Amino acid sequence: MNKMSVRTIAILLGVAVLFMFSAGCTTTPDDTSVDTKQDQSYTTISVSEIAESLADKGPITAGLDLDSTTFYTDSAYYYGMTNIDGPNGTNIFGDDPENNSAYTHAINNEFVGYYMPKFAAVDIVNMHQERGDTVIFITKKHSSPDERISDYISVLFGIDDPTVIFTNGTTKTPAINAENVSVYYGDSDGDITDSNAANNCTPYRFLRNKMTLQYNDLNYSLGEFGESVVENSDI
């Protein structure tokens, strides 16, 4: 099976599962719902409009966040935090998974196959590749001695030896500057403010999926910093 076939199958399967999860997440009148549109007091932009804004520029470096931007990863984190597969129904990663190196290793390795690529991210990466841009990935994830995220990205997006930078929970601004990133895509407030603090980087906000917002609506102030929101970037 060639690389393009693997990539296409992975994307289709990922989105199919995502739709299945979303369809199963129904609410009753008494349930608390999350408004993914918020008050819609923000400017939206399409992938083609971003391409048009770059038409007079030569090849640039574009950066993307991973969780909730390039990939829907909530299912991996949910299992890691709530599983009952340890002795007597305990969590296999202990009482504090986030501070367990085995959990971090699993998120960056064994669980990578559960990362579901978002259509909008595929469109963004394709657009930049067609322009001849360099596409890299900067994440606040914590690193581990080895990781398979790079291999996964290579197969899905056809990027040989992709650059994946882990900032270990710290600001992304130094990495954005060091890599001369001109545009950066991310879902969180920190993605936007870190980009704004960089030397010359335009941030674009990705929408979080409805399922993501059921568990994480923090640091998500659409348009708060004057950034444009990528249309249909929740899927």
Image (spheres, helix red, strand yellow):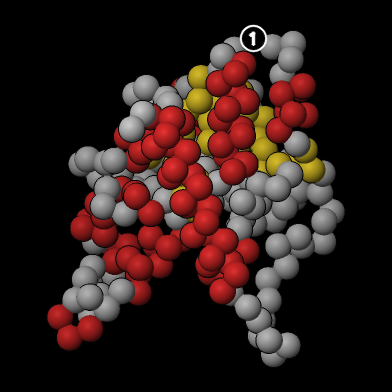
Q: Is residue 101 left or right of residue 152?
A: left
Which residue corresponds to the image point at 53% horizontal and 53% vertical from the top-left? 15
Q: Is residue 88 above or below residue 17?
A: below
Residue 3 seen: yes
Which quarter of the picture shows residue 164? top left
Which quarter of the picture shows residue 104? bottom left
Near mark 1 (Cα within 10 A), the count class, few <14, some 14-19 or many ≥20, is few
Q: Is residue 215 above or below residue 204?
A: below
Q: Amino acid at mark 1?
A: Gly
Which residue corresponds to the image point at 59% horizontal and 43% vertical from the top-left? 119
Q: Residue furthest front?
A: 1
Q: Position of residue 213 (x, y in %)?
A: 60, 65
Q: Nearer the viewer, residue 198 or 209?
A: 209
Q: Residue furthest left?
A: 87
Q: Residue furthest bottom?
A: 30
SS class, disc 1 = loop
Q: Quadrant of the N terminus?
A: top left
Q: Is residue 84 left or right of residue 23?
A: left
Q: Position of residue 179 (x, y in %)?
A: 47, 22
Which residue corresponds to the image point at 30% horizontal and 74% vertical from the top-left? 83
Which quarter of the picture shows residue 51? top right
Q: Dot 1 corresponds to which residue?
A: 58
Residue 212 seen: no
Q: Position of residue 69 (x, y in %)?
A: 55, 46
> Number of callouts in the render?
1
Q: Position of residue 36 (x, y in %)?
A: 70, 62
Which residue corresponds to the image point at 58% horizontal and 27% vertical from the top-left? 126
Q: Nearer the viewer, residue 23 or 160?
A: 23
